[in-house]
Amino acid sequence: MLQRVLGISLAITLLVGGGIAAREVMRPASVIVDEQRIALEPGTVSSIHARASGGLPFGDGLHWQIVPSWLGTMNENGDFRAGALTGSGTVTAQFGSARAEVAVTVTCPKEARVSGVRFTVACGRSADVYVDVIAYGGAPAAAASVDRDADRVARDLGIPIERRFRVYYLGSRQGFTAVVPEIGRSFSAAPGVLESDAVYIDLADAIAIDQSQDPLMQTEGALRHELVHRLVRQLVGYANVDEIPSWLNEGWAFVEESSQTSRLKMEARLVSASMAHVGKLPSLRSLTSQYEWNDRTGLIGLYQYYAAAQATQFLIDDITLTGLHRILKRVRDGESFAEAFGHSAPGVNFGDFQDRFSERVAALVQTYPGMVASPGTPYGPGTTVIAYGLTPNASATLKAMGPIERKLIDDVDAYGVFVEYIGAEFPVGDYQVTLETEGRTLQVAARR
């Protein structure tokens, strides 16, 4: 077995006849580590055996240093416990100025089990990816997808990824609600969080996604959404992330989530405009607290994301992405968001930005009411039909005329919006869609 030895000299003073001799005898001493390198999987333990030459006792003088620090932990007995992430680094035994180093690799496991859920595992460039055995896609494909989306989100935000992270794909709701608390340990979620389909657990630096609730395209959007939260937290730091208003944190995440889906972008813009038109658009000040954000459920729990996305886009349009970075870096350095805004964007008044929000959102649409068709649905091919600017809660009749005829009678929602999907239940072909409400008729062409 190879040994790592780095020597120093210990000065030993000789006592002669009760006095101190006028000379010192220099005896070489060193720290010796029996292991040259170790490799182990996340969460497992391997012992590292360190000793001093000549049998000298360490006492309390032996210290361990792990680089990078997240690689794992050491106890007083020399047991190294690998951390949660794969990677490589060193463990150094230090005794005075003597040092001995061990190369450590935390390897990618093939399988893992968390809270009774069995995962296959693949480790890409950016992340360690755990895929529930009952989820679709498989771990290698998921890891490749995570790498692509992580690269795209980092590029879009202009924030490079500084360290690895974990992603868990769950194949059942039961598995999701069991694994999320286990990953987070002390993580405590507001009621809406465990009811969601995806979550970023910042203390654990892990993303969990419930694939059983969403089709593949929405799962990919959910990953991009949570990656934004992770990168914002990385930039401003854990201690400062609560300074970021929720409308920006969640709005930026939604902008990125919908970046590959024109239908979702269109729906968010029109729904927000309708909310402003009927006087029910939440103010930015009401969308600041993450605790209040997480407590909202139902339709407004969805529509707040739509509104926040418009605010985020307005902000980037007004001060540029570079200006937003300046704000976030000042928040990282300890300033409040309002202070950082004032110092970083002197040409834009933060109060005015908030006060003019509803007016600017209403101006996203020139004519009210209206109805449009956008390719795609949340569930696959088809068309999404969106009517907006209607009387809230009014009764409406929608008719689709084409290869088949369909009629739907329902109420406009509380924000003046009526949405219908021409999806898999409709035969392929062209349709004329008509909406009648309160004596008004709106028409649009759609294709399945």
Image: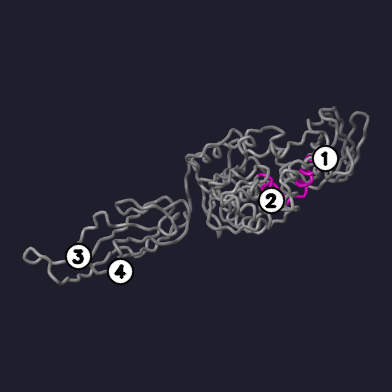
Secondary structure, magenta segment, majority class: helix
* Closer to the camera in the image, 416 or 212: 416
> Real-space Cα distance between discs 4 and 2?
51 Å
Which residue is identified by label 2? 256
Residue 296 as seen in the image, left or right of residue 435? left
Count neighbours of disc 4 (C-alpha within 10 A) and say few if under 14, some if 14 to 19, many if 20 or more.
some
Q: Does 89 appear in magenta?
A: no
Q: On residue 6, which mark appears?
A: 4
* Residue in the picture at 60% in, 54% down: 329
Residue type highlighted by circle 2: Glu
Q: On residue 386, which mark appears?
A: 1
* Residue in the picture at 55% in, 58% down: 162
> Real-space Cα distance between discs 4 and 3?
14 Å
Say whether disc 1 or disc 2 marks the residue closer to the N-terminus. Answer: 2
Say whether disc 4 or disc 3 marks the residue closer to the N-terminus. Answer: 4
Answer whether labels 4 and 1 touch (C-beta < 8 Å): no
Report the magenta residues as a range: 250-272
Q: On residue 54, which mark appears?
A: 3
Q: Does 259 appear in magenta?
A: yes
Answer whether labels 1 and 3 touch (C-beta < 8 Å): no
Count neighbours of disc 1 (C-alpha within 10 A) and say few if under 14, some if 14 to 19, many if 20 or more.
many
Q: Which dot, 1 or 3, sits closer to the camera? A: 3
Residue type highlighted by circle 3: Gly
Q: What kind of element bears circle 1?
A: strand
Count neighbours of disc 3 (C-alpha within 10 A) and say few if under 14, some if 14 to 19, many if 20 or more.
few
Residue 406 as seen in the image, left or right of residue 209? right
